[in-house]
Amino acid sequence: MRIGTGYDSHRFEEGRELVLGGVYIPDHAGLSGHSDGDAVAHAIIDAMLGAAAAGNVGSHFPSHDDEWKDADSMDLLARAAQILEAREYRVVNVDVAVICESPNIGPHAEAMRRRIGEVMRISSTSISIKGKSNDGMGWIGAGEGIAVHAVALIESRVGGASAEPV
């Protein structure tokens, strides 16, 4: 078993759609970013890759590469899951905290869990998504953007302490 943590943050940007955990959230400014700005997906990717000691979202999908311009982060998440599979790991569970003043995450959490589970090919019951307020403090509290923390637990599918060859 291995654990990884992930973090991502983006500022709100008018004129972009807000997508979190692969779910479109209407009536809200989107997030800036080279891809679609899905901070939930990016934090999960970093947690998964970190647990496998396989780099991070930027090392696999660099923002200076036009291939990833406006990319659907669910595609990036699926590719990250394939990287873990190639290393003989599987995701056991993911826990995500979305920190923002708005939108309210609660009404969208179940749809995010289902979408992420579908993309990662794991049960949505293995995914936790929760919203937290920053109680008006700092740039998040001022409504300038969103921050996301994620933790992923992975396990080797081949038994033993490490799936990587020595």
Image (tube, helix red, strand yellow):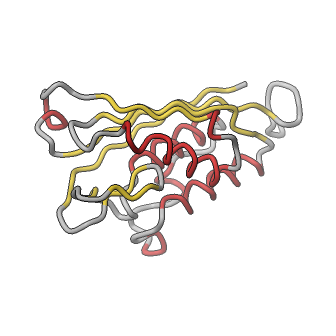
Residue 36 rendering spot, x and y as whole percentages? 38, 63
Q: Position of residue 163 (x, y in %)?
A: 81, 36
34 sits to left or right of 92: left
Compared to 75, does 90 lie above or below? above
Where on the picture, by quarter, is residue 55?
Answer: top right
Q: Residue at x 74, y 39 (%)?
A: 90
| Number of callouts | 0
Q: Residue furthest bottom?
A: 66
Is residue 5 in view from this perspective? no
Q: Can see residue 34?
A: yes
Q: Position of residue 54 (x, y in %)?
A: 63, 44
Q: Residue at x 23, y 42 (%)?
A: 102
Q: Quadrant of the N terminus?
A: top right
When asked about the image quadrant of residue 124, the answer is top right
As drawn, 11 above or below 15 = above
Quadrant of the frame with the C terminus: top right
| 123 to the left or right of 16 | right
Figure check: 76 above or below 71: above
Which residue is at a point 63% across and 58% down the rendered structure image?
A: 79
Q: Position of residue 131 (x, y in %)?
A: 35, 32
Q: Nearer the viewer, residue 29 or 166?
A: 29
Front position in the image: 149 or 115: 115
